[in-house]
Image: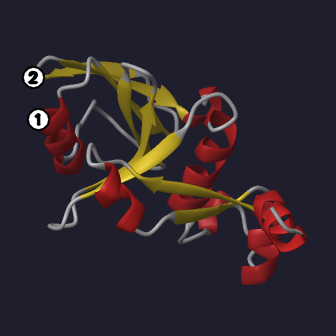
């Protein structure tokens, strides 16, 4: 690795796509997140509270990636029909889709994209990181847990 690559990796993190076919994975674009979200805020010149930001969901997605990627490898999942799951945690035998939803929930609602992933890959568990909502719901054979982002 040269100096530019080392510098680049200390500023951003990349999440590659989740696919069962490695050749497909290598051809897909990676999503980019900042290690220090303050740098992102400075580049955008936006220091507003999350309540006032149009990009609050993206900021929280970046937070979840930074918190969880230290212990597991994270990918994202997207289909050609634009169904997308924010992150997929992949271990040796365990695949867990993770959605980040920074909005208020009054009931445990599982959106269509996550349902598509569950139908396709049949994971044992799934995680929806929420603003402040706790809950559980079963979708097919998958237990979907709703947990506040602060517990990422």
**In the image, which disc is placed on residue 119?**
1
- The residue at 55%/52% (across/down) is 61
Q: From this view, report whether residue 19 is shown above or below residue 42.
A: above
Do labels 2 and 1 touch, CB within 8 Å?
yes
N-terminal-most mark, 2 or 1: 1
x, y percent for residue 138? 18, 19
Taking the image as shown, residue 69 lies to the left or right of residue 23, namely: right
Task: Name the quadrant of the C terminus.
Answer: top right
x, y percent for residue 19? 30, 48
Colour setup of the view: secondary structure
In this view of the protein, can residue 34 be seen by the observer? yes
- The residue at 49%/64% (across/down) is 30
Q: Nearer the viewer, mark 2 or mark 1?
A: 1
Dot 2: few (<14), some (14–19), or many (≥20) neighbours within 10 Å?
few
Q: CA–CA distance between discs 2 and 1? A: 7 Å
Residue tagged 2: 140
Task: Name the quadrant of the N terminus.
Answer: bottom right
- Residues 83 and 11: in front is 11
């Amino acid at each position: 690795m040269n100096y530019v690559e080392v510098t680049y990796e200390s500023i951003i993190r990349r999440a590659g796509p989740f696919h069962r076919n490695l050749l497909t994975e290598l051809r897909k674009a990676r999503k980019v997140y900042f290690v220090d979200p303050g740098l992102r805020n400075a580049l955008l010149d936006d220091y507003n509270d999350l309540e006032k930001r149009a990009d609050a969901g993206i900021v929280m997605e970046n937070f979840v990636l930074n918190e969880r990627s230290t212990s597991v490898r994270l990918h994202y999942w997207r289909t050609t029909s634009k169904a997308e799951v924010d992150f997929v945690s992949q271990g040796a035998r365990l695949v867990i889709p993770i959605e980040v939803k920074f909005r208020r929930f009054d009931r445990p609602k599982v959106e269509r994209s996550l349902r598509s992933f569950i139908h396709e890959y049949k994971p044992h568990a799934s995680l929806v990181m929420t603003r402040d909502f706790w809950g559980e719901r079963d979708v097919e054979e998958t237990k979907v847990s709703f947990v506040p982002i602060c517990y990422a």
